Image (cartoon, rainbow, N blue to C red):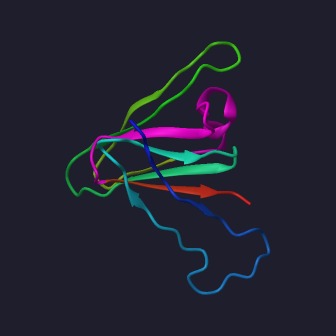
Amino acid sequence: MAETALTVQSIKAPFAAIAAGGADFTFAAGDVDDGNSFACTGNEILIVYNSDETNPYTVTVSSVDDEKGRSEDITAYSLAAGDYAVFGVGLTNSQGWQQSDGTINLAVENAAVLVAVLRLP
């Protein structure tokens, strides 16, 4: 299965000129059937949002063995209706999370789980 690639959105650098709308970002619906992935440099923040008004849904982030042979997926992280969750730079460090193709892989339980990937400057 090939995961659906997420577009990584860049955050403006400190002191950058920001016009109206220049700091906006967008969410994409997670791919329930194939999962999602994004290119990892180690400077990304993963934001997930359960847009459903009543039902809880989950997101899973797949890990890989780190330099000591450990792996620990973030399995079925539950988001109540309307909840947001943020997974930070530690998540996207190459050892333990980055797949052999340089991506981070995730899966959502329902397309109501929206995903945004922001890259720090």
Q: Residue at x 26, y 44 (%)?
A: 56
Q: Residue at x 65, y 21 (%)?
A: 66
Q: Residue furthest top?
A: 69
Q: Residue furthest bottom?
A: 20
Q: Position of residue 20 (x, y in %)?
A: 59, 86
Q: Residue at x 53, y 27 (%)?
A: 63
Q: Position of residue 35 (x, y in %)?
A: 38, 42
From what the image shows, is residue 68 above or below residue 58?
above
Pick the front one: 26 or 38? 38
Q: Position of residue 100 (x, y in %)?
A: 61, 30
- On whether residue 109 falls in the magenta region, the answer is yes
Q: Position of residue 88 (x, y in %)?
A: 61, 45
- On whether residue 1 falls in the magenta region, the answer is no
Q: Residue furthest front?
A: 1
* Image quarter of the C terminus: bottom right
Among the 4 quarters of the image, the one containing residue 91: top right
Q: Is residue 76 left or right of residue 13?
A: left
Pick the front one: 89 or 7? 7
What range is drawn magenta here?
87-112
From what the image shows, is residue 77 above or below residue 41?
above
From what the image shows, is residue 1 above or below residue 53?
above
Pick the front one: 31 or 61? 31
